[in-house]
Image (cartoon, coloured by chain):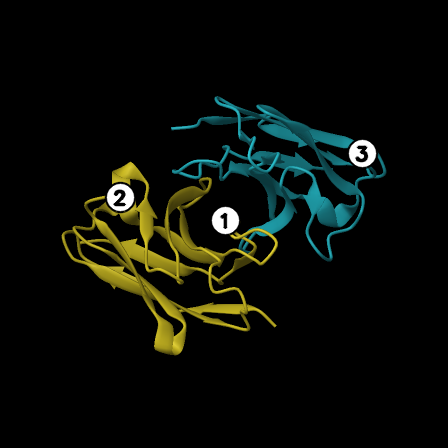
Amino acid sequence: DIVVTQSPDSLAVSLGERATINCKSSQSVLRSANNKNYLGWYQQKPGQPPKLLIYWASTRESGVPDRFSGSGSGTDFTLTISSLQAEDVAVYYCQQYHATPHTFGRGTKLEI
Amino acid sequence: QVQLVQSGAEVRKPGASVKVSCKTSGYTCNGCFLNWVRQAPGQGLEWMGYINPNTGGTQYAQKFQRSVSMTWDTTITTAYMEVTSLTSDDTALYYCARGSSNCWECAASWGQGTLVTVSS
């Protein structure tokens, strides 16, 4: 199985500041046939289902604010929130869907 | 508008089975995978498996191979997941989540979740 490791476990960032969450996979999730990284980022707020923010490692889902961005390739990835807003308080998960099981990271709790 | 609506909360005794439904609507992508993900109380997300509604093909995480069965009813565009031989460790919120035309494999849209409680 591909192991997905997120860091840090929790993060406190001031309003308006940048937040950075890292995700590392134990194997490359880059598929050479289409040059796509099979990695997504999700946001989960209390009492709600997760919400897809980023897919293919760097493609923002429709309706997601442009302060959210994803980067990286192969085994190392980053979710960046450029200017933290109060509504961004949540737990963030990365997930690889390159190979089954489509493993999630353990989550990063983001606080103000 | 894409929508996934799950069945209501369930309570079962250890050793029993439970079947959760996920009614989908608004999809034009027949090949978009339908994933099942669970979340134990206060814990993270655990991918259980998916079904390809186009082919009926399934993939399960190894730990669920013997206890989980995923099916799809094309006539009513509804997915089902049955979990057998329940234990207290299966107490969790169960989500269905489907891919999109941009990403078949992603969990792009989610149901509201179904709480399954296993207790004697």
Residue found farthest to the front:
A33
Q: Specify the colour of chain B.
A: yellow
Foreground: B20 or A71?
A71
Q: Is residue B84 visible?
A: yes
Q: Residue at x 80, y 34 (%)?
A: A14
State which chain disc 3 sits on: A
Q: Mark 2 is on which residue type?
A: Phe
Q: Is residue A5 above or below residue B46?
A: above
| The disc label shown at residue B105, or none | 1
State which chain disc 2 sits on: B
SS under mark 2 = helix
Q: Mark 1 is on which residue type?
A: Glu
The residue beneath circle 2 is: B64
SS under mark 3 = loop
Question: Share a chain, discs 1 and 2?
Answer: yes
How far apart are the alpha carbons under marks 2 and 3? 41 Å
Chain identity for the colour cyan used in the image: A
Question: Share a chain, discs 3 and 1?
Answer: no
Q: Is residue A58 above or below residue B82?
A: above
Q: Residue at x 41, y 72 (%)?
A: B77
The residue beneath circle 3 is: A14
Between disc 2 and disc 3, the foreground one is 2
Q: Is residue A63 left or right of residue B74?
A: right
Q: Is residue A18 left or right of residue A12?
A: right
Q: Residues within 10 Å of mark 3 (few under 14, many from 20)?
A: few
| The disc label shown at residue A59, or none | none
Foreground: A83 or B103?
B103
Q: Is residue A35 left or right of residue A97?
A: right
